[in-house]
Image: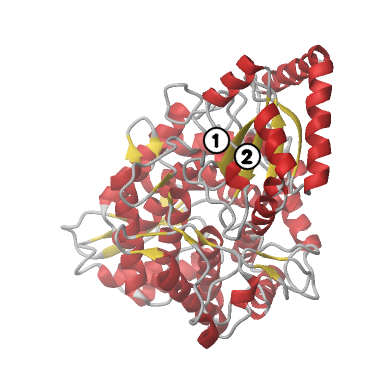
Amino acid sequence: MVTKGIRFSPRPNRAHEINWTDWGPEPLQRAEREGKLVLLAISGVWCHWCHVMDEQTYSDPQVIALINERFVPVRVDTDMRPDINARYNMGGWPTTCILNPAGEVLAGGTYIPPEQCRRWLEAVERIYREDRDKVEARLAELSEEYDEEQELRAEFPPLTWELYQDVLQQVLESYDSIYGGFGKEPKFPMIDALQLLLTEHERSGAKRPLEICLHSLGAMATGGMYDEVEGGFFRYSTTRDWTIPHFEKMLEDNALLLGVLARAYQITADDDCARVAGNVVRYLTATLYLPEVKCWAGSQDADEEYYALPLAERRQRPAPFVDKRVYVDWNAHLARALLLSGRVFGENSWQEMGLATLKELWERCYRENYGMAHYFWHGGEPGLYGGLADATAMGQACNQAYQETAEPVWLERAQALARYVIAWLPARSGGFYDYRPDPAAPGALARPRRDLIQNAAAALWLLELSALTDEQKYAETAKRALQSFVSEHGNWGIMASEFARAIAVALTPWRVLNITGDPATVARPLWEAARQSLADNLVLRAGEAEMDAQAFLCLDDRCLAPVQEPAALAQLLEETRQGELR
């Protein structure tokens, strides 16, 4: 059977002859009943090596027969089920993983050629059959160790600037001064690291972090990772110098890079940032926009032959496949980036698209007590409710929408999502689980998981929401989530960049700007001036609409004298950003 939502390689293959089933309790129960192991295959519609696995390994007659006869085969799309991917990914895609009937990992890898795969499957199955008691005993020990890690903590270490500087220093040391970016090959955009560098520049005024960020953005935009013909970024580079990319294009990457480009332009007014940002939006609008639902498709397949062609020749060939599933977190990231970049670059239509996407996501995918769904198709029901990443991305976008429009409904929606996360996702050991540990929740998993990157993003959202609402519970919860990861953040290297950025926000006093008067009329010039100065630790709040147009800036526990003129407000915000009035 072909599992729901899964596409096999677009080239000839026999992978569909394997009796794949969807993830769920049924295949695990069947494995227990029939005395078999589970073969879990995690793939992506955009994934080149997943296609190769279909065409070679899963098209080998002996592999097909072996899997069908001696395993329960389960196939999962990584974008549709990020929860499964987070728990079972073996270091990339495709992931090939063997589980016992309880869902515990016995062995796994990524791409495995046909002959090697046959030997491997037979060996793991034989060892498990002959020494099942010993294997199960060891798995039980590991499960007990996991349960101990989830115990309630009585104390949490403090957040310090030393923690922030430790991660920042790792980012600076990982910088490739020759080619830009971080580390060697393969090279990913490392968007969180770029955001951290911008935060450090805004915080301290240091030039080197900004220079590293701009060099890295420029190297990506002038190398093979950027599509000069149709616009948009490919997923990553296989080479240190950015010349040979992996050719899939992901909505998430382009959305987040658009936000970085807008933020960098706001600081520097660099024309290259504006040009590349415009081409990213051009690509997204032309290829991934789904006007019937006012949202955006998830990805476009890799096809190196197609992308090597000039525009005229590309138009004579079918474009690579576009996955038209709408992923809530990625769409929310893009909506937020469109709101920010639309303001920064003066493109009102971008902001309109961002707001339309947010409204559609909320109307289709929000459920009280279940948060946000993770995905939907046009004409289909939303699926996989309750994820931290979806609630966080949507909450961040709602925060942004409120500060761009002054419409209270966006703040109300952000708070509704915060109530869900705080009520249903708290982990006993601190922070938040990635999914709701509740069997009644649609698509729920039996064993929840804590993730540093997701918790850092949630903390950034809740810290900002606290400043917008004066609700201290949000800030306290955010700081506790960060504290719960202090002892383990060192294991993440520069992947802890979002964690470090959240610490900086948590330790820096907020600047809260209250603007009175009607935001659509008399107070509009003040709102426009304020929006051009948005940065970490600055939030905009709407005051009484019936009052005269004035802006009141509050720092810590004191408020400065009100200003009425946009130019005076812009100057005040610049002075306080640099700390002159602190």
The amino acid sitting under disc 2 is Ala
User: Tag on residue 86?
Assistant: 2
User: Tag on residue 571?
Assistant: none
Q: Position of residue 580 (x, y in %)?
A: 55, 66
Q: Position of residue 107 (x, y in %)?
A: 77, 33
**Pointer 1 residue:** 434
As drawn, 356 above or below 62: below
Pointer 1 and pointer 2: residues touching (CB < 8 Å)? yes
- For the residue carrying disc 1, how many other residues have a C-alpha within 10 Å: few (<14), some (14-19), or many (20+)? many
Question: Closer to the camera, 89 or 521?
Answer: 89
As drawn, 204 above or below 144: below
Residue at 80% over, 29% down: 124
Q: Position of residue 210 (x, y in %)?
A: 65, 71
Left or right of 478? Residue 483 is right
Chain-order first, disc 1 or disc 2: 2
The amino acid sitting under disc 1 is Asp
Element assignment for label 2: helix
Q: Quadrant of residue 33?
A: top right
- Tell me if I can see residue 569 in this picture: no
Q: Position of residue 209 (x, y in %)?
A: 69, 68
Residue at 67% over, 19% down: 147
- Tell me if I can see residue 322 in this picture: yes
Question: Closer to the camera, 96 or 178?
Answer: 96
Q: Which dot, 1 or 2, sits closer to the camera?
A: 2
